[in-house]
Amino acid sequence: MHKQTTFLANVRTALGEAPQVERSKSTFPRLFAAPDTTETLKKICGRTVTELNELVTIFLHNGNMLNISSHIAESLHEAADVVVELIRTKEPEFNYVKHVIMHDHPDIAALELWNRFNREAVTLHTTFSRDRQITDKTIASFIGITAPTIGVADSATVIQLTEPGRPRSTSLLPSLHIALLRRENIVADLAEAYALLRQKSYLDSLVFISGPSKTADIEAHMVYGAHGPRELHLIVLAEPVTER
Amino acid sequence: MSKKPQSQYCMDAKKSMDSPRLQASLHSLQNRFGKGAMALWAEMDDQDMRRRVKKSRMKNLEYLDILLAELAKNVRTRGGHVHFAETAQDAIDYTLDVARKNEVKRVVKGKSMLSMEIAIDPALQEAGIEVVETDLGEYIIQLAGDKPSHIIAPCIHMDRSRIGELFAEKLGIDYTDDPPSLTAAARKALREKLLSADMGLTGCNLACAATGHISLVSNEGNIRMSTTMPPVHVALMGMERIVATLDEHRETVQLLTRGAALQKLSTYVSFVGGPSSDDDPDGSKEFHLVIIDNGRSKILADPEFREVLACIRCGACLNICPVYGRIGGHAYNSPYCGPIGAVVTPLLDGINKHADLCKGETLCGACKDICPVQIDLPRMLAALRQKLAYGSDRWNTRQHNPLEVYAFTLWRLIVCWSPLYRTGLKIARLCQRPFVEKNRMIKRMAGVASGWTDGRDLPPIAKKTFDEIWQEKHATPLPKLPVATKEDNNA
């Protein structure tokens, strides 16, 4: 703390303030003032299915340019079909066994993937927070499945919050990342997404993901799969709605 | 004939200009990203955004002490450690101490220019710790024992065959010059390092005081790896890299990724604000934020240069600078190259020591035009030159070349007194005669003037001045020009 005191005193001297007099944020209420987002939040909640579908179109268009493979599923069963197809057709990169790791999320559980593989050797893991072997299971997995909290159409971004049972490595270590995103969780742009984030009372770590991992460090030649997943598959869950 | 010894800057610059490979890479880089960024700014819907972010950056600097205290408080609430380091040595000592306590044997690094500024790698290595760069470009540079030459494309000066040979030698793979295969080889080698490292060492692109997060941008995912897999995470942060609120963060980070690589957002933007919770299987169990001054408060105190602290280190100015575009990054001999480096390096590390950088840029203003936060680098370069010309106690700068002052005093005397100037011209015309070649150009000059003709021919001084020609051809006084009247304008 002593270091902090002298460090900040230095800063105050540089700013022409009295070095020893600590300035309090309450004296400058405008410094941390955030714009009112009530209207934005109202807009997000009040979107009709047509408007949401437009956002999906924009998301997929922008995602396409970032090499995101996208799928639209009208039911959880359809979404599961997409996942099963990916697990069947893709090959592991770092070993020879098909391990799949998934977040502890109701939508992912509802895919009932355990019921789908009767003849193939596919091992499914869920990141339950009491499991002590999650790291090893994640390293062994070639596909990681998450259900991001927010999708941003304008920048084709999914926002993944770190929560109990939803660690960061699931969307990072496997060669393939599948993000299952509900249509109603898509917002138009980052301004709306940040408004939603500000709603949260507590924010742990979080990550914005806009596409598969990539690098252009060798002669500006674009290569996908530098350190993170080389493919990002987005499944938009757009269940038909009768009312609203 | 003996030539005066050239500075390192001149020699490195010449080396770059003699390399066709580097010239081609720099050209295509500037063509794509420099022009791209200018087009992006011109097309942007929200034309006020850059001005707004600049304003918020400058405002935040004014309240820096409050913001840093708030950030520290919020990180500590989450269980993270915050250390304030006034000097580079202080930051190194603290990091080494953390490494020692955790018995760290291997450190994986996310790309950080600040880590180069404080030279932490040699200190860690001396303590017997293996240091591994994880950004592909930086990793290649590290394997080659070279230095990065661009803020976001560190190995732009190396071609694929050179990288292929390097990987064959150091990673023991068969030679290939195919970028995807080379990337895959590095991916595999680095994955092992990343998964077994004891400590992750990263920089900080932008901290948010209100929420107590640092945020880091990357495309490769190496930063996510370095912050997620090792049990200890140390983040080095320059004290000016902070915004007050999430809303400011949103706009600033978008300008950063647009300026850097024309992206609406980089592939990953990670927010970290402390150690991971106990039931979280990954994420670091210890989080240390080291906030570093190392000369920044001195810049902050000088109203002439405070603006440079608004920089968000996107590297856009490198992508348009005509000087960087020729001489490349190595000549700057600093972790910070390009126009921003030419201003910030002298300020952090001594104006006299880096006099070549202040004088090497052209003041053409392109860096100001492209800067996402419109920093007036040309103005500050001129101010630095002023310090070099007259010396400055505040910046502990001595007159760079006292002879220059005499020369300019003499020059002022001559140009202010026309008979002397005219006589001087006549003498110069006589003196230049032996140097004028058949094509009516001067190819080589003598002595100190030889530098002017090293790279180009100069036209000789004309036989008659403009004034003399005018006197000859229009000797009669001109008739008075008619004065424009209101009717004329309306006609």
Image: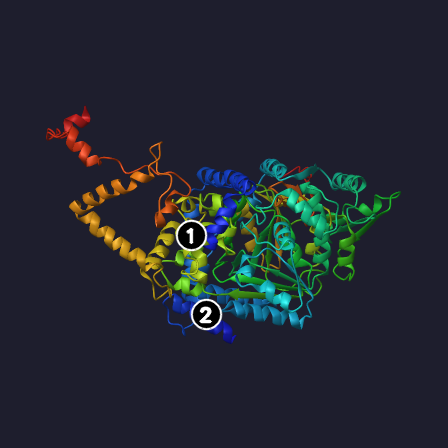
Q: Mark 2 belongs to which subunit?
A: A
Disc marking residue B2: 1
Instruction: Give the left or right position of residue A144, taking residue A117 as reference.
Output: left
In this rendering, the answer to whether A185 lies above or below A128 is above
Whole-percent x and y of residue B18? 52, 43
* The C terminus of chain A sits in image quarter: top right
Labels 2 and 1 share a subunit: no
In this rendering, the answer to whether B224 lies above or below A157 is below
Please name whichever residue, B188 or B176, is drawn nearer the observer in this view of the structure: B176
Whole-percent x and y of residue B124? 62, 66
Please name whichever residue, A139 or B368, is drawn nearer the observer in this view of the structure: B368
Residue at position x 76%, y 49% in the image? A109
Judged from the image, the secondary structure of the residue bearing numbered disc 1 is loop
Whole-percent x and y of residue B230? 68, 61
Disc marking residue A188: none
Does the rendering let one see residue A163?
A: no
Q: Report how far apart the C-alphas of labels 2 and 1 lie in the structure.
A: 54 Å
Q: Mark 1 belongs to which subunit?
A: B
Residue at position x 57%, y 68% in the image? B92
> Pointer 2: residues within 10 angstroms few (<14), some, or many (20+)?
many
Whole-percent x and y of residue B441? 34, 35
Q: Amino acid at mark 2?
A: Leu
> Which image quarter: residue B466?
top left
Residue at position x 64%, y 45% in the image? B162
Disc marking residue A8: 2
